[in-house]
Amino acid sequence: MNNQFKFSKGWAAEMSGNYNTAFEDAQFIIYDLGQVTAGIAKQVLMGKGSLKLNVRDIFFSQTIVGDIRYQNIRGRFRRNRDSRVANISFTWRFGKNCSDNPKEIAAEAMLNKAKLEMVINKIIAVKRERMLYVGRWCSSAF
């Protein structure tokens, strides 16, 4: 599950999570576990930078608990990891701002494609000229 939210004044949020039901793996029975992650972001410095904060495993639910069953041996285990992690980051974007308008993005992509095709056609034309020149030189040499 993943949800993204955009708010006014450059604020955004994201919340995601996963859940695994109990399952068997060879002689192990692993009980259900999951985690929830949430984060917020703020555009700063006139859209040139962004400040982000996120926390993984908010409810500290990534604890693995299970049973071991092998012939007449029974055991239980619990694995507690330090799975709750908080991150803070700052991102600075150099250069011009890109547009979020799909029409502008599509127009720029078509323009770049046309430029690339022109360059490729020039390269092909130059190679053909060289091949013709080499072909004429080889046929006149004999």
Image: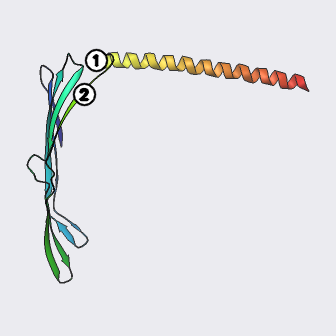
Looking at this view, is 65 or 6 the one in front? 65
Q: Position of residue 118 (x, y in %)?
A: 55, 17
Give whichever of discs 1 and 2 has the lower sequence position: 2
Badge 1 local density, few (<14 within 10 Å), some, or many (20+)? few
Q: Position of residue 103 (x, y in %)?
A: 32, 17
Q: Mark number for residue 52?
A: none
Quadrant location, the N terminus? top left
Give the amino acid at mark 1. Asn
Q: Residue furthest left?
A: 59
Q: Residue furthest bottom?
A: 72
Describe the element under mark 1 as helix, strand or loop: loop
- With respect to residue 52, does 82 lie above or below? below
Quadrant location, the C terminus? top right
Q: How many marks?
A: 2
Occupied quadrant, residue 2: top left
Q: Position of residue 107 (x, y in %)?
A: 38, 16
- With respect to residue 110, does 27 lie above or below? below
Give the amino acid at mark 2. Thr
Occupied quadrant, residue 16: top left
Q: Do tag 1 and tag 2 residues touch (Cβ < 8 Å)? A: no
Q: Which residue carries the number 2 mark?
A: 91
Q: Position of residue 48 (x, y in %)?
A: 24, 19
Badge 2 local density, few (<14 within 10 Å), some, or many (20+)? few
Q: Which residue carries the number 1 mark?
A: 101
